[in-house]
Image: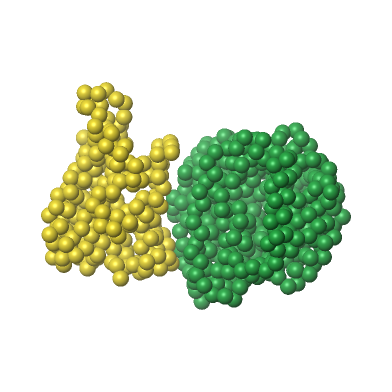
Amino acid sequence: MRRVLVLGATSAIAQQVGRLYAARGAELFLVARNEERLAAVADDLRVRGASVETAVADLDDAGRHEDLLARAAPLDVVLLAHGVLGDPGETGRSAEAAEAVLRTDLVGPVSLLTRAAQRLEAQGSGCIVALSSVAGDRGRGSNAVYGAAKAGLTAFLSGLRNRLAPAGVRVVTVKPGFVDTPMTGHVAKNPLFASPERVARDLLRAIDTGADVVYTPWWWRFVMLVVRLIPERLFKRLSL
Amino acid sequence: MQPLESWGRYPLARQAAVPVHWRSDPLPTVHGTLLPFGQGRSYGDCCLNEGGTLLATSRLDRFIEFDPGRGVLRCEAGTRLGDILAFAVPRGFFLPVLPGTRFVSVGGAIANDIHGKNHFRAGTFGRHVLQLELLRSSGERTVCSAEQNAELFAATVGGLGLTGLVTWAELQLRPVQGPFIDTETVPFSGLDEFLAIDADSSQRYEYTVAWIDPRRRGLCGLYFRGDHSARPGKAPPPREPAAFPFDLPEVAVSGPTVAAFNALYYARGRLRSGRKLVRYASFFFPLDAIGRWNRLYGKRGLLQFQCVVRDPAAVRALLDRIASSGLRSTLGVLKTFGEVPSPGILSFPRPGATLALDFPNRGADTFALLDALESMVREAGGALYAAKDARMSPATFAAAYPRAAAFERHVDPAFSSSLWRRVRAA
C-alpha cells in the first residue's frame, strides 16, 4: 500500500495524479486551501478507490508545514503540485507581487521539501516529486518571476536529489510545458497545450520507472534545448 | 481543449466559452445569455449559443458518492458516460440507458433526455435520474427529483440546458455480471421484414437496433439485437481513440462512395450474421473507434435527421422519399420506441418508430430533402429530435411539443440557446 502526500491537491494535475493512485487503491493525504474544493476532490478519489485524509491549509504559511508533515507521516511519496503563475504584468511592476509568487512557488516548497527530505532520509526510503516547469529552463520577459521561481525550484530539487541519493530517497523533477488547467485559463489554447491527464500519466511513469527529470510531453526537452542554445545577444531581442 | 462546435458542425456559431471547474462556484457574470456545454455531441444548434456564452463543463467530472449496495452513483454533470462505465462495469454495474457514443456527459444526457437501444424496456435516461442539483442564475441551488420540485425536474429532464446548470446528478445503475454482450446480427430487406423481426426481438432481447440503407431498389439493413451476457470477465476500458486528423474534401462522402460503403457494410454484415459474444463498447459504441469522425463529412459538416412517427405507413413514406431523393446516408438507424412514458416536458421519445439518418451538408439539395421530410413528419403527427436538429421550423416544434409553453415558465431568464431562439421565433 502506497501512502502519498499531495500538496496542492485541487490543482488540475494533482487531481489526475490522484485518480491514477486511487485506481491503485493508494492512501492519500490531501492538502489544499479551499475546503469545498478539497472535499470535492477527496470524495472523487474515495469513490475511485483511494483511502483519503485531508487537511485544509495555506501552504504559504510555513508555520503549518511541520504539523502537516507529521500528520501525513509515514510517507512513500510526497507530491508537490501547488503553485501560481502570477500576472506577468503585475509581477513585472510590483515587487510585492513578485515576492508573493516567489513565496508560493519557491520559498514554501523549499520549506516543505526540506522537512519532507528529513523524514524520508531518516526512514531510508521514499520519493519526492515536484512540479517545476519548462519556464525555469530560461528566463523570459513575459514571466521572469515565475521562471525564476521554477529555476530555483529545479536547482533545489537537483541538489536534494544529489544529497538524498545515498540514503535511498528519490527526487523527481517534472517539467510540464503548457497545460490546459485553470492556471492557464486566460491563455488562448494552441496545439502545444497538453491535458492534465497526459501530464499525470507521465508523472506517475517517472515515479514508477525511476526517472530523475522528466519533461512532459517529452518533446519539450528538445524545444527547451534549442531555447537554451540561443545566444543571449539574440535572445534578449526576442519577444517571448 | 475542445472545439466548441456541435457534432454536426452546422450551423457555425460565434460565442464565448467559460470553463466551469468547481460545482461550488457561482455562475460567471457575463453579458448576454448562458448555456451549458458538455461534450458537444448533439448535432445541430441545441448546444450552441450565438452571441452568448457557453459554460464548458468537461472539468466538472468528479464522482461524489457510490453506494454499491443500491447501485446508486452521484457524480458531477460533466462526467462522461464512458467514464462511468469504466468505473461501474468492474464493480458489477452498468448504465441503464446508453446512446451511440460513450463521449456524452451526464448533463447532456439529461438535457436531451437521451434514449438507447432498450427504450421499449428502460425508457429514457431521465427515468434513471434519482435527483439532480440545478444552479440558477439567481444563485439559488435546487435539488430536484420526480418527488421534490417535480415540475422543475420535469422541465430540466429534456430541457435542453435552458433551466439552469445541472451541477450534479444521482443515477440508478443496473447490475451486470460482466462486460460482454451476447449479440445476434440478422440481415433483412424491406420494411415489413424489419417490422416482423422487431416485433419478435423486442419480446426476447433487451437491446435492439437496425442499421438501414434506403435505396431506390428497396430498403436493406442489418438488425442487431443483444443481451447482457452472464459470462464474467475483465474488459480493459476502451482507450481514447485517435482523432481523425483533418477535414476530408467533400467528394469523400458523396453518392458513389456512400453507396459503395453501404454495400460493403451490408455484405460484411451478411457474412458475419449470427450470434457472437462482444465487449459492450463494440456493441454500443461502434463509431467511437474513430475520434472526431465528423471530419469525414468535410468542412461544411453534416445534418442529422431523426424523427419519431407512430404509423409504419409514415415510416415507409419517409424511406421512399429519401430513397427517391438520390441523397444517400451512411448512418441510417431504425428502431422502435416503447410505451414507457418519458419524464421530461420536452422529451422526444414517444411510442412509434424512430428513424435517424445523416446527410453531408450539400446546401440546397440537402435542405430541400430535410424540409420535405419535416413536413411529412408533421403531417403524420410525429416529432423531430432537438438534439439532432438544425432546421426545424417553429410550427413543427410547436406541433410536436405542445407543452412548450408550460416548459417555458421554467427557463432560467439568463439562459438561452441558438436552437431555442430559432424554434420559439414568433
Q: Quadrant of the C terminus of chain B?
A: top right
Rendered position, A95 above or below A67? above
Q: Nearer the viewer, residue B40 or B393?
A: B40
Measuring 28% from the left and 33% from the top, which residue is drawn there? A227
In front here: B118 or B65? B118
Residue shown at 43% from the left, 67% from the top: A47
Which quadrant of the structure image shows residue B149?
bottom right
How many numbered dots are placed on residues in this image? 0
- Residue A173 location (% of width, % of height): 25, 50
* Residue B203 x, y percent position in the rendering: 75, 72
- Residue at 16% in and 67% down: A123
Q: Please tell me which residue is depicted at 79% across the width and 49% down the height of the picture.
A: B214
Residue sitting at the far front: B271
Note whether residue B46 is visible. Answer: no
Residue nearer the viewer, A33 or B269: B269
Please indicate, yes or no, whether residue B43 appears anywhere in the rendered image: yes
In the figure, is residue A133 to the left or right of B387?
left
> Above or below — where is A236 with respect to B332?
above
- Figure quadrant of residue A182: top left
For residue B413, side relative to residue A85 (left or right)? right
Chain depicted in yellow: A
Residue farthest along the right direction in this orientation = B313
Relative to A82, say whether A99 is above or below: above
Q: How is the image coloured?
A: by chain
| Residue B403 falls left or right of residue A176 | right
- Give whichever of B262, A210 is nearer the camera: B262
- The image position of residue B220, as x and y in percent, is 78, 54
In the picture, residue A208 is in which quadrant?
bottom left
Q: Which chain is green?
A: B
Q: Where does residue A157 sit, x and y in percent of width and height?
A: 19, 50
